[in-house]
Image (spheres, grey):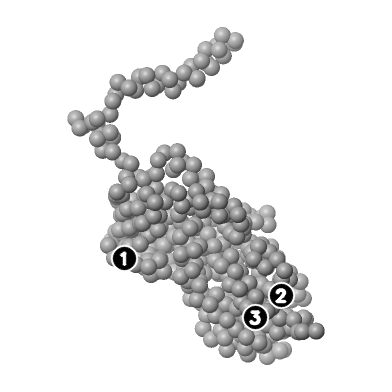
Amino acid sequence: MSKEKIALAYSGGLDTSVMIKWLKDKYDADIVAVTGNLGQQKEIENLEAKAMATGASSFSFLDLRKTFVEEYIWPALKAGALYEDIYPLATALGRPLLAKALVDVGIEEECTMLAHGCTGKGNDQVRFEVTFASLAPHMKVLAPLREWEFKSREAEIAYAKEHGIPVAATKKSPYSIDENIWGISIECGVLEDPMVPAPEDAFQITTSPEKAPDKPAVVDIEFEGGIPVALDARKMDGLDLIMALNEVGAAHGVGRLDLVENRVVGIKSREIYEAPAATILHFAHRELERLTLEKSVFQYKKNIGQDYANLIYNGTWFSPMREALDGFVEATQKQVTGLVRVKLFKGSVTLLGRTSPWSLYNEELATYTEADTFNHKAAEGFIQLYGLGLKTWSEVKKNNS
């Protein structure tokens, strides 16, 4: 009988470092450690050496940033996907890609099981495992944090020390932090009390709005087919454009979000987010849609955006529903082409102007000057017909009162 082989989503932190040894012993298995780079800055150095020293049989480091931007972030931006009207879904968008990468490596390495380090009451366990079920239903899934014997971080550290597992500093941050290029999520510690303002040490990249520059930044963002392609007349690929907006937005205190959200598992959770580029781009994209989309399409698309956000948040990215929604979104985006000018100032994003070759704004119809071409005489008959149903209802109601 061949030996078991487990593909593990590996971050290099305490949990997954301990997990390699724990899984290896419990299942008498070879461990394939897999790390995906989505633009995170922490805990990505010397990962291969750490994984191998911890007991992994092999290690894969995958640069997924370009794929993340083009195949996940841009579709979500075009859809206008903001969970519960606020959260641009940075962590939630990254999970299906990381899970897919793990499946791909697992299949290539002929693994029999997939393992992740998600907790038993978080959203990520759902996102990983639903993706596994969609892409590799034949593979067994392991979630050690739901079943192992360790009840605390200290117990894990003691296990690591006993087995010579190299782990970083043992001092625990008061916060749980997840980071990628689209945003940072921060939770735990004092943030668990919704009445406590987020302390400054919780924020990782953004300047406090009060301490942001007194001079605003003005940015021109150009879109083609709903996708941002240039900043201040300089063409840029998606990754560089997001990085540039993260830098200028963070410097001006833009992108701080504080949300009590509804988790997939049925509980409410208070989360702090930093998403400068996502905040700016969602704002600019929506304003360009206001200019270019026909009224009924614009209003209906808001519903689609909510459905798309729920789909991402709930972990069903790889689904026929997302493919169907993508069809609608793509049909709306050709005309979302043009330029949006915004001002970034002490935490705010303000619209300064917008223009598009697909603009539906007609100044001759909108103006109140002598250049007005609107047929005012047509309004009387329009109003009579428009209100006829309500007028009839009111008369019948009065006669029967």
Disc 3 secondary structure class: loop
Residue 235: image tag:
1
Of badges 1 and 3, nearer the viewer stands: 3
What residue sits right under mark 2 in the picture?
113
Using residue 145 as the reference point, say whether residue 83 is left or right of it. Answer: left
Q: Residue placed at 52% from the left, 47% from the top?
A: 304
Q: Amino acid at mark 1?
A: Lys
Question: Image point 31% across, 65% down: which residue?
Answer: 235
From the image, state whether disc 2 or disc 3 is nearer to you. Answer: 3
Which residue is pictured at 59% across the width and 52% down the height?
Answer: 321
Name the quadrant containing residue 58.
Answer: bottom right
Q: According to the image, label 3 marks what residue?
A: 109
Q: Is residue 215 above or below residue 388?
A: below
Looking at the image, is mark 1 or mark 3 earlier in the sequence? Answer: 3
Relative image position of residue 333 (x, y in whole percent): 42, 51
Q: Earlier in the sequence, mark 2 or mark 1?
A: 2
Q: Amino acid at mark 2?
A: Met
